[in-house]
Amino acid sequence: MKTLELAKEVQEYVVKMRREFHMNPEPSMKEFNTSARIKEELDKMGVEYKSVAGTGVVATIHGNTPGKTVALRGDIDALAVVEENDVDYASKVPGLMHACGHDTHGAMLLGAVKVLNQMKDELKGTVKFFFQPGEEVGRGAAAMVADGVLDGVDGVMGIHISSDMPTGTINADGGPRMASADAFKITITGKGGHGARPEQCVDAVVVGAATVMNLQSIVSRELSPFDPVVVTTGSIKSGTRFNVIAPTAVLEGTVRYFKPEYKDVISAAIERIAKSTAEAYRATAEMEYDSCVKPTINDDECAKIAQEAASKLVGKENVLHLPPSTGGEDFSEFSSVVPGVMTRLGARNEAKGIVYPHHHGKFNVDEDAFKYGVAFYAQYALDFLNK
């Protein structure tokens, strides 16, 4: 395929840009230098662009033939993770690392700009390139949408590199792919006192423990066993000393689901259980609930286009079909407005020791995967516009 041949030609450039991004990670919504470097590269290519959502960038290539508009998305923010890799392109910023592969997304998307800029004559429409900030905090995509980036866009496609899949494989299934990422906070108020006089108190630790256990019944007894749901209490903060009964307890957790209508059902259940449990122990409870990220549900037609494009590049046998993930992804802010598909690009290589999971201090990727990512971006755009 022409896209793959051109992608191989820009492979060295993509590796160079990825390593530069990796050495200079920036936190979510503060990707100032990363954004500036992307603009510098686009200037060199002679590709038009505009700034959005603070540190976001949208580049545009118009084909010689009018038609639809497709958007390709790559996020660019890093994580508060200490780098443990002994490589010459390791992070130069203490406590900050591209531990999820967003450095590769930005670099591959720049590579796709180069490839499609050479293929303008074959473009029947327009391609937009979304260099997105703030994915890790679930704010970047929504901010871009608020700035109007989807105006006139007919479809959107994203790639997430994967340390779970071997290099040379791609996943692009339709339907629910990634879960919501909601957060809840329950504040329990009891009555503190001496640990030797519990009858004079209302123990917030006991109420908190009971609440955690009672929340488990939401998944097991209130929802269908055929619909994957997670309700996790990840933090309990209460008490100051071994012989003091705590007056307050704060529980924080996350909720994951694929059915959008579950948001109201689960949040109402958490609040009901928290308040009624507290009341049973003579305490009170208040809940805060935040819908951070919507479920990512791939459009079936877009997924079909993506699978066909992937087959042209890596072979049908290397287009993997995988179950959904309960991880969250704010790509859903785009795909809930226009048809979209979130895909995964394999970059695991056990022979090179590249086996660590995302968000780990030793997370790394097989750079040989970049040519497939660049070509996949480009091939999807061509096929979407030509269909």
Image (cartoon, rainbow, N blue to C red):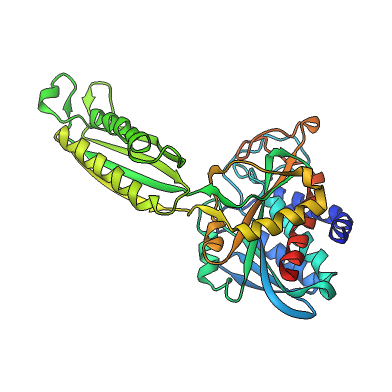
Q: In the orientation shown, which residue stands out farthest toward the left? A: 200
Quarter of the image containing the N terminus?
bottom right
Measured as percent of width and height from the top left, residue 112 is found at: 77, 61
Q: Quadrant location of residue 348?
A: top right
287 left or right, relative to 47: left
Q: Quadrant location of residue 133?
A: bottom right
Q: Is 71 or 170 nearer to us in this picture?
A: 170
Residue at 68% in and 43% down: 162
Q: Is 214 or 52 nearer to us in this picture?
A: 214
181 left or right, relative to 39: left
Measured as percent of width and height from the top left, residue 243 is found at: 23, 21
30 left or right, relative to 258: right
**Would you place residue 174 above or below residue 68 in this image?**
above
Residue at 45% in and 46% down: 257
Q: In the orientation shown, which residue stands out farthest toward the top? A: 196
Q: Is 277 or 173 nearer to us in this picture?
A: 173
Residue at 54% in and 54% down: 297
**Would you place residue 124 above or below residue 162 in this image?**
below
Residue 200 visible in the displayed image: yes
Measured as percent of width and height from the top left, residue 152 is found at: 60, 76
Residue at 57% in and 57% down: 331
Q: Quadrant location of residue 312?
A: bottom right
Quarter of the image containing the C terminus?
bottom right
